[in-house]
Amino acid sequence: MSETLFTKIINREIPADIVYEDDLTLAFKDINPQAPVHLLIIPKKHIATINDIEEGDREVVGHLYYVAAKLAKEMGFAEDGYRVVMNCGENSGQTVFHIHLHLLAGKPLGWPPYTDKMKQA
């Protein structure tokens, strides 16, 4: 298994503000939040990108979305709405090659989600 920043968080080698954990997943606050609520939900199993998801990973990938909905309800923003995003590869903005959901909430989120840098490209 490749050692990533997220692997080190799972193994408690580096700290994170963990908000949820179960046998399959870990959720923690993003250190560079893009919304008032910005959580990362990761599988404990290392899967580098969406392209690396195999048939046997269906349960864990589905479980990531289950955890996102559970946290949205428990944290009180499910009814107001939230966004869940998973990037794949460098051109999408993926910087840690261990799949993860970004759970964003707490403000109106526009669409499309362009940044100034992307608009110039």
Image (cartoon, helix red, strand yellow):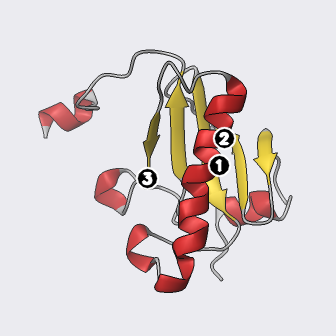
Which circle's residue, 3 or 1, is located before the other in the chain?
A: 1
**Picture coordinates of residue 46, whole percent (x, y):** 62, 74
Q: Answer whether labels 1 and 2 touch (C-beta < 8 Å).
A: yes
Which quadrant of the rendered structure holds the C terminus?
Answer: top left
The residue tagged 2 is 70
Q: What element carries label 3?
A: loop
Question: Residue at 81% across / 53% down in the picture?
Answer: 14
> Is the residue marked by circle 2 packed among few (<14), some (14-19), or many (20+) residues within 10 Å?
some
Residue situated in front as seen by the camera: 57 or 27: 57
Going by the numbered disc 3, the residue's amino acid type is Met
Mark 3 or mark 2: which comes first in sequence? 2
Q: Tell me the residue at 57%/20% (across/down).
A: 36
Q: Residue 67 carries which label?
A: 1
Horizontal side, residue 10 vs residue 121: left or right: right
User: Left or right: 42 with respect to 9?
Assistant: left
* Horizontal and vertical percent position of residue 6: 67, 60
Q: How far apart in space, not on screen, are marks 1 and 2 (Cα)?
A: 5 Å
Q: Is disc 2 placed on a helix, strand or loop?
A: helix
Circle 1 packing at 10 Å, graded few (<14), some (14-19), many (20+), is: many
Residue 15 higher or lower than 60, as above or below: above
Disc 3 vs disc 2: which is toward the camera?
A: 2
Res 60 seen here: yes
Q: Mark 3 points at which residue?
A: 86
Amino acid type of the residue that numbered disc 1 sits on in the rendered structure: Val
Residue 16 in sight in this render: no
Q: Distance between the residues labelled 3 and 1?
A: 14 Å
Question: What's the CA distance linking mark 3 and mark 2?
Answer: 17 Å
Q: In which quarter of the image is residue 111?
A: top left
Name the residue at 55% across, 84% down: 56
Q: Is residue 119 left or right of residue 19?
A: left
* Three-letter amino acid code at the position of disc 2: Lys
